[in-house]
Amino acid sequence: MTEARAPQLPTVDDVATRAGVSRQTVSNVLNSPEIVRPETRERVQAAIDVLGYRPHASARRLRTRQSSTIGVRLDPVTGNGVSGSVFDRFLHALVEHADARGMRVTLFTARDDEDELQHYMRLRDGADIDGVVLTGTRYDDPRTAGLAAEGIPFVAFGRPWGAEPLDDPARLWVDVDGRAGVQAATEHLVGRGLRRIGWLGWPAGSGTGDDRRRGWEAAMTAAFGHGAAELRALTTEAEDRVPEARIAIERLLAAGTDLEALVCASDSLGLGAMMAVREAGLPHFPVIGFDNTPVAKAVGLSSVDQRLDEVARATLALLMGEQGTRVLPHGGADRHPRLITPQLIVRRSSHLAPVEEEAGGTTSGDHINGKETQE
Amino acid sequence: MTEARAPQLPTVDDVATRAGVSRQTVSNVLNSPEIVRPETRERVQAAIDVLGYRPHASARRLRTRQSSTIGVRLDPVTGNGVSGSVFDRFLHALVEHADARGMRVTLFTARDDEDELQHYMRLRDGADIDGVVLTGTRYDDPRTAGLAAEGIPFVAFGRPWGAEPLDDPARLWVDVDGRAGVQAATEHLVGRGLRRIGWLGWPAGSGTGDDRRRGWEAAMTAAFGHGAAELRALTTEAEDRVPEARIAIERLLAAGTDLEALVCASDSLGLGAMMAVREAGLPHFPVIGFDNTPVAKAVGLSSVDQRLDEVARATLALLMGEQGTRVLPHGGADRHPRLITPQLIVRRSSHLAPVEEEAGGTTSGDHINGKETQE
């Protein structure tokens, strides 16, 4: 059995002894080299190099109160496995962009909003984080007010629905323009000559869901002059789960609907709708989802891509400045919320005629509004 | 515009001034209270309470060289969106179990194995991590040897395939017994009276894939005495992507196969196979996947669950002891790799007769080897 031990790291004292100087001189070389005579500086640097001494990150944090770390609460795993991956994909993009700026991401869990706030305060007090990225924002989210009151820099992924004004510079956010994305998806179907384009959405009352529906409404009203009653007649609602959506569309088809296509509030709804129309023997009934989840890609479901990489980039730009390597204190700079325009990805599920599929990758049939994707 | 500033935190000096004692006495109260006279201790404690002073986490880390943090490299996002979620679900479980032990998880990205090792060394040198959880282990993984040589405590999720012996206590791992899981899935179909049970696997040469296949071989040989030639005749291979699997099974069905069911090496393969048999008008041709991904749950695909929560629990038990709150140095304790037995989740896709589906949740049809699941 190998008895592996952590090697003893060289200390400031080791460097001082080897260079024949005081601890303070070593510290000066590290922190204020301009006040040290050049030949002393060189001797100390030589000792640092020979011993492989590295200034202690915790000591540096203690001096500077900078941790180079961003805190993120891990989203509770939801029952919805299809759209639940949005957080995980955002997290991947965030860690990659943070890494490019020399920042790390620390994860923790919390029971509720209050517990989450307590976590942030402890992490801030311990100089364990410089700032926070919030996710899962809701109507009347108490976390944004709490963080603002504590002076902890943060940016939210998601609009603080209901917390007007939405452009308060003390509550910065990045969000995806769901309305624009759904409008583009609907216009895509209108452009193919379809008229009876239905909306499959969540029950009303969700900021995100209502916003997405408005994109479908706008496109349908612009194209056909539909009013509220006509829009209502084209609407189906289901909870955000595949079987619910499938059963809702099965019922619609069994009742002899004249719908020609469906635009859906999520990929969960889109996948359920796609299963229902396929099993009803309608392989060319167009269905478009939202979120461009890995599942949509895997099964060939057209979908609206949130551009999470751009969301992560913009989140860090608000937190740290466009090119910065440090979290900025809030309130100083001229910073505004950012609304990212999503992108329609056209796949097999929204084609009106059969498409030959090739093996060799799931992206071969993907197009962004008519252009080949570069995913 | 609100000019929010971080409030100035109270320092040891503030506490000392308020209590009328020296800095050293405050430090003694915090670190060696037994050497301080009770009335002084109470006065200092009162000042700490009034001022809301909290000992600085970075200072504590500097003293103790403990960061209460585990380092994890974020898996590069793979093209495969279905099984790619295994890492994310493991990460969720790991953060939750770590949190219960007072530990945080810090994420970073790396270009390659060498870069990953450099990251661990920098994080260790900076007292930023106490230990490491490795994922994505492969044949001849250089990271395990590198971490062992550096004396950085680590546990791998995944066997160090090819690095014999597998029970080297300096290279601890937790893995899922894929072979046992696939064997249980195959036996489940055998128990339903099926004989022509095919294997849909990855091309040979993957430690994980070959191990899973051996479970199918064992069950088929035990039930029917099949030799290598018969097993080969029942085997189909495809890269781990939905369209490849779908096309492979479409071809098999078009050629007039006598297969009655399929056991698959992953949910990506299982989903492709399920789409192929359904569209061929075979709604009751059983298909079983592996990984129990959210997608399998969403579409009703029977699958083998890796029990990632148990994997995360066991990983921390090896890294920190069964109940510990600190990462243990390697090599000392009597610790062995752990092989977790996965669990077959039976859903609609492996039923031989139609099943009435209920709305209200995707789990309503799920069973674990005949028992209702408690997911």
Image (cartoon, coloured by chain):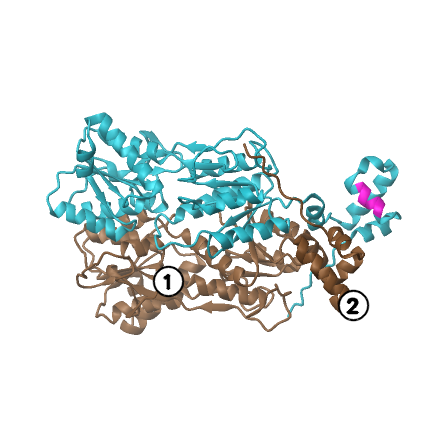
Chain colours: A brown, B cyan
Q: Residue A349 versus residue B117: which sits nearer the camera?
A: B117
**Residue B227, position in %: x, y?**
20, 30
Q: Residue at x 22, y 67 (%)?
A: A194
* Magenta segment: B24-29
* Mark 2 residue element: loop
Residue A62 lies, with reference to residue B5, above or below; the image says above
Q: Tell me which corner region of the image, top left, top right, bottom left or bottom right, holds residue B184.
A: top left
* Mark 1 residue element: strand
Q: Tell me which corner region of the image, top left, top right, bottom left or bottom right, holds residue A50.
A: bottom right
Q: Residue at x 32, y 55 (%)?
A: A296
**Residue B335, position in %: x, y?**
52, 30
Residue A143: which disc? none
Structural crowding at the residue carrying mark 1, measured as other residues with C-alpha within 10 Å and reported as few (<14), some (14–19) or many (≥20): many
- What residue did someone put label 1 on? A305
Is A274 inside the magenta-drawn segment?
no
Q: Can residue B365 be seen here?
A: no
The subunit carrying tag 1 is A
* Marks 1, 2: nearer the viewer: 2
